[in-house]
């Protein structure tokens, strides 16, 4: 019996525990869900709810002033955000995964999932995020039950064939370009390994599959405009370089300034 319960835990057959909360860390029913959301008291993963706000959130492809925004501008806005978050949270420990949702439903839009290597790193980050603001909005952070992102992400979206679009209940993970991925994740793989992992072999990740998948994503990803799912016929083979040049992106000084602002906003609240 216990074995049976264990095998259905967090699945559709489980009438007690909510499978969406268990797998994706977010459920559209929120606190009114008829099944249990077992909030972890500790986890290596944090969810920062609705944190990323795309510049064309009111009308796709158009900014708040009604001006059209190019796919390159949208992507570089997102990558600046990603880098901000990565640098800020990376202070607390090694980041294994940083996923930002492209979903549109209220319970998933702009959700940021960060998985640290260790639970206490996540706990330290969570403590530091309490009461902080980003871009004028309070950061809502919590431990998340998600530790296996393979289970949480939408495979069809990765294959550009999800017909549920932005209202899909699985994560549609926004991609960053390979340069930024290498810059951010590469450094952890080289220089910043924690002391205690010294004795471990190179294959220290307990989940090599995920890394493999990330490498595949990296290989496949070319910015192709926001609605790349519906674009076809272009072929996937070309080495198109459509990203704006580095000079068009915000300089690191500006980013520093914004992080400083985070801290000031935080102090102002305390
Ligand atoms: Zn639920
Ligand atoms: Zn989907």
Image (cartoon, helix red, strand yellow):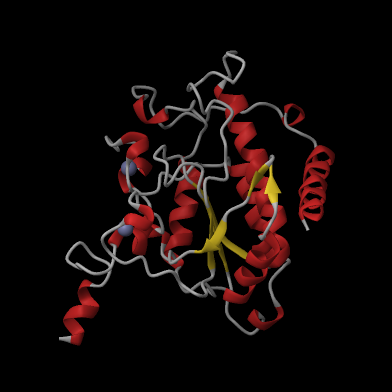
Q: Is residue 2 above or below residue 265?
A: below
Residue 10, position as x, y percentages in the image: 28, 67
Q: Which is nearer the eye, 251 or 31?
A: 31
**Number of numbered discs present?**
0
Q: Which is nearer the eye, 12 or 190?
A: 12
The residue at the point 41 percent across, 37 percent down is 104
Quarter of the image with the N terminus is bottom left
Residue 173, position as x, y percentages in the image: 45, 45
Quadrant assignment, res 190: bottom right
Q: Is 229 situated left or right of 65 in this image?
A: left
Residue 183, position as x, y percentages in the image: 68, 50
Q: Is residue 195 above or below residue 189?
A: below
Q: Which is nearer the eye, 124 or 234?
A: 124
Quadrant assignment, res 193: bottom right
Q: Quadrant of ligand 1?
A: bottom left
Please indicate, yes or no, whether residue 24 appears anywhere in the rendered image: yes
Quadrant assignment, res 192: bottom right
The residue at the point 57 percent across, 58 percent down is 141
Q: Which is nearer the eye, 120 or 105?
A: 105
Q: Is 224 situated left or right of 244 in this image?
A: left
The residue at the point 64 percent across, 32 percent down is 76
Q: Is residue 150 above or below residue 224?
A: below
Quarter of the image with the C terminus is bottom right
Please indicate, yes or no, whether residue 242 appears anywhere in the rendered image: no
């Amino acid at each position: 019996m216990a074995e049976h319960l264990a095998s259905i835990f967090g699945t559709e057959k489980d009438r007690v525990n909510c499978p969406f909360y268990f797998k994706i860390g977010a459920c559209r029913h929120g606190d009114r869900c008829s099944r249990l959301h077992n909030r972890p008291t500790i986890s290596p993963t944090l969810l920062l709810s609705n944190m990323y706000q795309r510049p064309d959130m009111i009308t796709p492809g158009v900014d708040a002033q009604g001006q059209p925004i190019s796919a390159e501008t949208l992507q570089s806005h997102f990558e600046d955000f990603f880098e901000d978050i990565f640098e800020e949270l990376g202070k607390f420990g090694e980041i294994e995964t940083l996923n930002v949702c492209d979903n549109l439903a209220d319970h998933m839009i702009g959700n940021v999932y960060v998985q640290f290597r260790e639970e206490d790193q996540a706990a330290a980050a969570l403590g530091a995020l309490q009461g902080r603001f980003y871009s004028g909005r309070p950061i809502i952070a919590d431990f998340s039950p998600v530790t296996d992102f393979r289970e949480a992400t939408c495979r069809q979206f990765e294959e550009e064939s999800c017909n549920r679009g932005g209202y899909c209940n699985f994560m549609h993970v926004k991609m960053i370009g390979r340069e930024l991925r290498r810059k951010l994740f590469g450094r952890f793989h080289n220089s910043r390994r924690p002391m205690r992992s010294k004795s471990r072999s190179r294959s220290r990740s307990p989940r090599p599959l995920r890394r493999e998948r990330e490498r595949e994503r990296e290989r496949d990803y070319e910015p192709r405009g926001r609605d790349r799912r519906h674009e076809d016929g272009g072929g996937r083979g070309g080495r198109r370089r459509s990203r704006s040049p580095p000079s068009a992106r915000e300089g690191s000084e500006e980013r520093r300034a914004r992080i400083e602002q985070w801290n000031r906003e935080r102090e102002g609240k305390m």
